[in-house]
Image (cartoon, grey):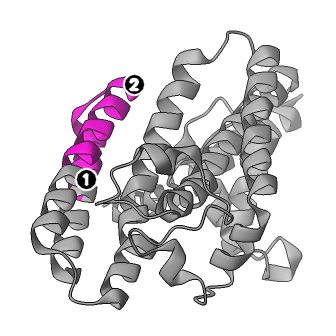
Amino acid sequence: MDKFYKETLSKLELKISELEVEVDCSLQRTEAAINLILECLSELKEYVLRRGFKNTNEEIRFFKYQKPTIVAKLIYYNAIYKIETRKPYRAKRIKKYLNKELKKLKRFFDNNLDFYKYYRSNNAFLDEIFFVRGKHDIKLWLDTFYFEADHRFATSHDYKVAKIIANDVIQVYLEDQLHSINLKKASDNSTLNWTASKTALTELIYALHSHDVFNDGNADIKLIAQTFEKAFNIDLGDFYHTFMELKARKINRTKFLDNLCEALIKRMDEQDEK
C-alpha cells in the first residue's frame, strides 16, 4: 500500500504543478485540479477495495495519514473555487467577505477542539475507533458526512483529519488575500512609489547590504528587501534570482549604481558652476 500511495500522490502533485504552467485562468486551474484529485481518489479506492489491508496498522496509517492528505487537496481546491466565484467587488466588501470565511474556519476549530487536540498531539489510543472501517462510535464527534459516505472506503474520522489539513492551507490563502488588499491600500495612500526597474532596486539593496549600513551589518537581506518593498510599494519577486542575473552580466554589473554616481557628480558640478 505504501508504495502505491507514494507513487499515486507523486503523480498527482506533478500533474497539479504542471497546471500552473499550462493553464492561465486560476478558476480553470482549480477546476482541472479538482478533476485530477477525483480521478486519483477513484484509483485509490479501487486499489483498496481490490487489495484490502495487510493488518490493522496499515489500515489506520492509510485512513489517518494517507487518504486525508489527498482528500485535503480536494477540500482546499473546492473551497478556493467557491471563495473566488462568490467573491464580491470592491476592497471593503472583499475584506468583509474574506474575514467571514476565516470565521467559518474558526467555528470548525471551536466545534472540533477535542479532536484537534487528539490529532495534533499525535495520540493513538482511539485510532482503532477513528480510523478502522466499521468501528464508529456515534458519541465521538461524528459528522453527518460519514453516514452518507461509502463505508468500504471511509472511517468515522478520516474526513475530519482531511478538513483539519485543508483548513490550515485555506487560512493561509485567505490571510494572503487580505494582506494583498492591505498592501494595495497602503500603495494607494503612499506618496512614494519606486518607478525605476526592480533590477535597479535589487542592485541598490545588495550594495547597501554589502556595505553593512543596517544594524551594523547584522541585518538579513530578506528583511531589507521587505522593508524597501513596503516603503516604495513594489513587489521585488525573487530578488535573489535577480541578483544572480546581475552577477552573470559580462559587463557593467553595477549599471544602476554607476548611473547614480554619475547623476550625483553631475548635479554637484552644475551647482559648483553657478
Q: What residue sits right under mark 1 in the picture?
A: 41
Name the image quarter holding the N terminus: bottom left
Task: Judge from the rendering whether residue 259 lies leftward or rightward of residue 61; answer left or right.
Answer: right
Residue 60 lies in the magenta stretch = no
* Image coordinates for residue 188, horizontal then vertical, percent: 81, 20
The residue most toward the top is 89
* Predominant SS along the magenta part: helix
Residue 221 sits in quarter: bottom right
Q: Does the rendering let one see residue 131?
A: yes
Name the image quarter holding the C terminus: top right
* Image coordinates for residue 238, horizontal then vertical, percent: 50, 54
Residues 44 and 241: in front is 44
Identity of the residue drawn at 43% across and 64% down:
155
Looking at the image, tell me whether mark 1 or mark 2 is earlier in sequence order.
Answer: 2
**Can you say whether 137 is above or below 91 in the image?**
below
Q: Secondary structure at mark 1?
A: helix
Residues 215 and 83: in front is 83
- Separation of marks 1 and 2 at Cα, in angstroms: 21 Å
Identify which amino acid the numbered label 1 is placed on: Leu
Q: What range of the chain is rendered magenta?
A: 14-39
Numbered tag placed on residue 27 in the rendering: 2
Residues 117 and 27: in front is 117
Identify which amino acid the numbered label 2 is placed on: Leu
Identity of the residue drawn at 68% across and 9% down:
89
Give the label, 1 or 2, closer to the camera: 1
Could you tell me how many numbered marks the image carries?
2
* Image coordinates for residue 125, horizontal then vertical, percent: 61, 90
